[in-house]
């Protein structure tokens, strides 16, 4: 009779590599499920837009855009009136108001998270430790 070789694992004993692999697989599947639920939660409309009808959502988004553009135009016209540079301030602040209106509209539709959430979700990479210090 031949003896079982000591190279391979016994069929009766659990393999430590497979146990570690299954634990890592369970951990990975848990992290994937958490990421999926977080992604689904972030794509839901904001609380102020959940119960609104289509018309109400449209009017809110349009008013966000128009308000940003009008405020930018009024600020630009006011600066032009004070300093006597009529077209320049109006044009510059009208464009800034247009950009602010687009950003407000995207935030109202929950497409762009507020700045603090963006900063918290992506921390900066840790600096690599230098072996040699330069003075």
Image (cartoon, helix red, strand yellow):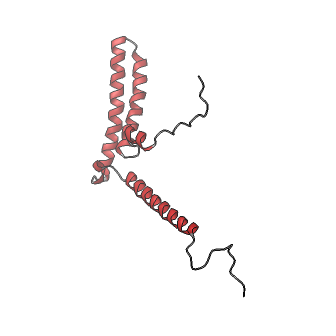
Above or below: residue 16 compared with residue 13: above
Residue 7 appears at what percent x and percent y?
69, 72
Picture mark count: 0
Q: Residue furthest right?
A: 2
Q: Nearer the viewer, residue 130 or 48?
A: 130
Q: Nearer the viewer, residue 121 or 107?
A: 121
* Residue at image point 52% right, 64% down: 25
Above or below: residue 123 compared with residue 35: above
* Residue at image point 55% right, 74% down: 14
Q: Quadrant of residue 84?
A: top left
Q: Which quarter of the image is occupied by the N terminus?
A: bottom right
Q: Quadrant of residue 100?
A: top left
Q: Residue furthest bottom?
A: 1
Q: Nearer the viewer, residue 52 or 2?
A: 2
Residue 126 appears at what percent x and percent y?
51, 39
Q: Quadrant of residue 30?
A: bottom left
Residue 17 appears at what percent x and percent y?
58, 66
Q: Which quarter of the image is occupied by the C terminus?
A: top right
* Residue at image point 37% right, 46% down: 110
């Amino acid at each position: 009779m031949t003896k079982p070789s000591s190279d391979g694992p016994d069929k009766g004993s659990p393999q430590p590599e497979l146990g570690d692999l299954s634990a890592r697989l369970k951990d990975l599947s848990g992290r994937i499920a958490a990421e999926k639920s977080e992604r689904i939660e972030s794509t839901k409309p904001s609380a102020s837009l959940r119960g609104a009808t289509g018309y109400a959502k449209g009017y809110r988004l349009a008013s966000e855009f128009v308000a940003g553009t009008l405020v930018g135009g009024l600020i630009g016209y006011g600066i032009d009136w004070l300093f006597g540079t009529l077209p320049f301030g109006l044009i510059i602040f009208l464009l800034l108001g247009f950009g602010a209106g687009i950003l407000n509209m995207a935030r109202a539709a929950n497409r762009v998270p507020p700045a603090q959430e963006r900063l918290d979700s992506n921390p900066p990479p840790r600096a690599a430790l230098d072996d040699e210090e330069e003075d």
